[in-house]
Image: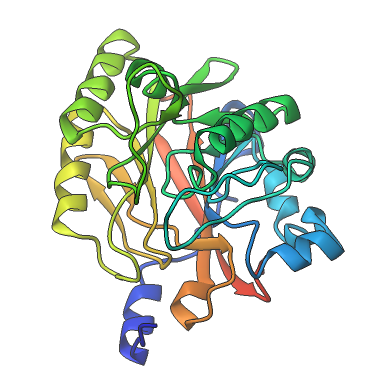
């Protein structure tokens, strides 16, 4: 377990603020497309007893009103959803009950990022189950497919004339997980593969805004790594309008690279870790406007008893 100094807590939290969205007129808000993003959602270990006794609705109860105000809600699902126990050989292994997929949809979740290091915890069968249960519940999985081409296909969210493509990928190796071609898996491209996919999409759809949701970085580090900086710059050059990161379990800074918004890490969201920094998180609303601009506001959240609280 790592210990963090008070100075680190202060320096990390000062990067984040709650910006006021009331400056936009009602008409502008109606025309814009709002997508809300969260950090890691764990539905096992210390969270499981709460989900089993009080329900998914209780876990998300305080943030659900924010979910309802957005046009779409994208979470990082840090747990396979399957009733079959088929764990792979790794240190931390999670599993969520299949019935919770529909509960997630009920609280307002519309999209789930699958490209992370835990959706494979119950092996290939568990991964396929996760995709199936999400789809049947009306939640759109991102970062999954039977080929790299499919895994790199974005989920497209539209509202009126606004169109946003959401890509999802993991940039690190996964413990004891070896994906083969033509077999279901999550998106684990090289930096060049991901950058090329973003560039091609941007050229083909120049009026579509692009958001890249990435599982990257170093756990418990409050500052992004050199690798994160380098990849963010490449994705910005390729045409990404925003980058949403997770995996470090703590908040990392917000940055702008050549006009691209970069949220290096949103931290945890529904999680059971105890160090103070792992219990500070935020939600991010990205607003896509008719004039092609992208603005944002952040909602600071404190995780209390494993659930996000305001």
Residue 81 visible (yes or no): yes
Residue drawn at x 79%, y 42% as measured from the top left: 99
Please state, as top left, top right, bottom left or bottom right, where the C terminus lies in the image.
Answer: bottom right
47 relative to 154 in the view: left or right: right
Residue plotted at (65% across, 56% down): 43
Quadrant occupied by the N terminus: bottom left
Point 37% across, 31% down: residue: 187
Rendering coords of residue 169 (x, y %): 36, 36
Residue most toward the bottom?
6
Rendered location of residue 177, percent (x, y)? 36, 42
| Image: 152 above or below 120 | above
- Nearer to me, 240 or 98: 98
Q: In the displayed orientation, state which residue is furthest to the right.
A: 53
Quarter of image, res 211: top left
| Relative to 119, residue 158 above or below | above
**Is residue 29 among what the camera can see?**
no
> Who's the residue at 25% across and 67% down the image?
223
């Amino acid at each position: 377990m790592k210990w963090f100094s008070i100075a680190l807590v202060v320096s990390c939290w000062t990067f984040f603020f709650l910006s006021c969205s009331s400056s936009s007129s009602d008409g502008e808000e109606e025309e814009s497309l709002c997508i809300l993003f969260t950090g890691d959602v764990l539905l096992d270990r210390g969270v499981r007893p709460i989900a089993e006794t009080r329900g998914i609705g209780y876990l998300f109860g305080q943030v659900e009103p924010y979910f309802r105000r957005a046009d779409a809600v994208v979470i990082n699902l840090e747990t396979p959803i399957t009733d079959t126990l088929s764990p792979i050989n790794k240190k931390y292994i999670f599993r969520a009950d299949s019935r919770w997929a529909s509960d997630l949809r009920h609280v307002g979740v519309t999209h789930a990022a699958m490209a992370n290091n835990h959706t494979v915890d119950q092996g290939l069968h568990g991964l396929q189950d996760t995709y199936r249960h999400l789809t049947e519940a009306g939640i759109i999985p991102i970062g999954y497919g039977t080929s790299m081409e499919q895994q790199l296909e974005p989920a497209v969210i539209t509202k009126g004339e606004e169109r946003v493509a959401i890509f999802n990928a993991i940039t690190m190796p996964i413990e004891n997980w070896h994906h083969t071609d033509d077999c279901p898996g999550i998106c684990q491209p090289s930096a060049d593969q991901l950058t090329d996919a973003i560039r091609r999409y941007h050229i083909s759809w120049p009026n579509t805004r692009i958001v890249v949701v990435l599982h990257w970085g170093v756990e418990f580090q409050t500052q992004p790594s050199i690798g994160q900086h380098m990849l963010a710059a490449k994705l910005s050059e390729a045409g990404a309008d925003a980058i949403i990161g997770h995996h470090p379990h703590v908040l990392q800074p917000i940055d702008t690279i050549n006009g691209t918004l970069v949220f290096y890490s949103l931290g945890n969201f529904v999680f059971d870790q105890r160090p103070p920094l792992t219990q500070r998180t935020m939600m991010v609303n990205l607003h896509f406007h008719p004039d092609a601009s992208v603005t944002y506001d952040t909602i600071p959240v404190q995780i209390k008893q494993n659930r996000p609280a305001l």
